[in-house]
Image (cartoon, rainbow, N blue to C red):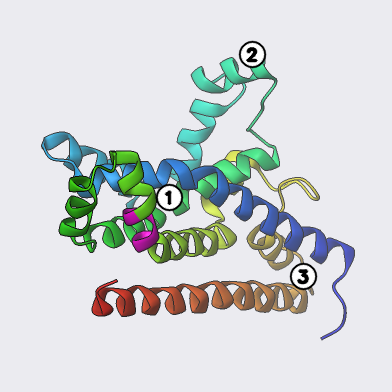
């Protein structure tokens, strides 16, 4: 395969940037939500769980439209962020990262929630009886046990972000060098007669990155199972 052209490299690097920022920014909130969903009780837990998973069942274009209404320059949140902090999401790469984070959030939370639910509560209770605070129990007992699940969730969210298209193009459009990620670049190439080879080339790159992320996720998932079976 010949070296990437400047346009292809730009789309790849932008996708990696958007996906990386999306995962890093959403990881702390995802961990908090996963903990609450795994340990919380009451009807509110079910409502939040449904809300978290909503992006998986809604058409991505609908999610992008809601993002545009909410975080656009005239939206209730977007207007405040723009005026107070100069932070703009609509038609910027930051908006692409926001859309990717929302679309990958359910996968991240689910992986972390399953890891938390697999932790033996007796281990945490034993640490508490020795005088450890809740924060210390989480940092020294819970977090090390669920760390493979956290990593797996982050990888799944990253893979989802790399392939995100519908919500992104609706929210931030398809601007070369600014919001044109790999999926958008593939879509653009398919609209131009004779550019099918370019679309195929970009698709191969996208598949390679996604497969690498999924293989990494599978490896980490096996580590989780091994830890659970070993009683760690």
x%, y% of residue 164?
Answer: 55, 57
x%, y% of residue 223?
Answer: 39, 77
Between the C-alphas of marks 3 and 2, the distance is 45 Å
Question: Residue at the bottom extreme?
Answer: 1
Between the C-alphas of marks 2 and 1, the distance is 26 Å
Question: Upstream in the sequence, badge 2 or badge 1?
Answer: 2
x%, y% of residue 189?
Answer: 73, 66
Task: From the image, state whether disc 1 or disc 3 is nearer to you.
Answer: 1
- Viewer-closest of 112 and 84: 112
Per the image, the residue denoted by label 2 is 84
What stretch of residues is rendered in magenta?
A: 141-146
User: Quick one: quadrant of the N terminus?
Assistant: bottom right
Q: Please tell me which residue is depicted at 53% across the width and 64% down the height of the picture.
A: 159
Q: Please tell me which residue is depicted at 73% across the width and 63% down the height of the picture.
A: 12
Horizontally, residue 67 falls left or right of residue 79, namely left
Q: Please tell me which residue is depicted at 51% across the width and 21% down the height of the picture.
A: 77
- Viewer-closest of 184 and 33: 33
| Circle 2: element type | helix
Task: Tell me if mark 3 has few (under 14), some (14-19) or many (20+) residues whose alpha carbon lies within 10 angstroms of its own.
Answer: few
Q: In this rendering, does residue 211 appear at all?
A: yes
* Residue 193 numbered mark, or none: 3
């Amino acid at each position: 395969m010949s070296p990437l052209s400047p346009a292809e490299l730009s789309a790849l690097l932008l996708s990696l940037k958007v996906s990386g920022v999306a995962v890093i920014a959403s990881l702390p909130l995802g961990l908090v939500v996963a903990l609450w969903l795994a340990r919380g009780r009451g009807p509110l837990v079910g409502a939040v769980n449904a809300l978290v998973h909503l992006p998986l069942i809604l058409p991505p274009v609908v999610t992008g439209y809601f993002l545009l209404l909410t975080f656009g320059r005239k939206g209730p949140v977007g207007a405040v962020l723009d005026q107070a902090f100069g932070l703009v999401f609509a038609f910027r790469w930051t908006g692409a990262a926001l859309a990717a984070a929302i679309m990958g959030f359910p996968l991240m939370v689910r992986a972390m929630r399953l890891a938390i639910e697999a932790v033996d509560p007796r281990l945490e209770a034993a640490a508490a009886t020795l005088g450890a605070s809740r924060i210390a129990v989480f940092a020294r007992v819970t977090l090390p046990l669920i760390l493979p699940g956290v990593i797996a969730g982050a990888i799944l969210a990253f893979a989802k972000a790399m392939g995100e298209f519908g919500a992104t193009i609706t929210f931030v459009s398809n601007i070369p060098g600014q919001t044109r990620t790999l999926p958008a670049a593939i879509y653009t190439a398919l609209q131009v007669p004779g550019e099918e080879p370019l679309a195929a080339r970009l698709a191969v790159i996208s598949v390679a990155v996604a497969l690498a992320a999924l293989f990494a996720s599978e490896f980490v998932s096996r580590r989780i199972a091994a830890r659970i079976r070993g009683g760690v």
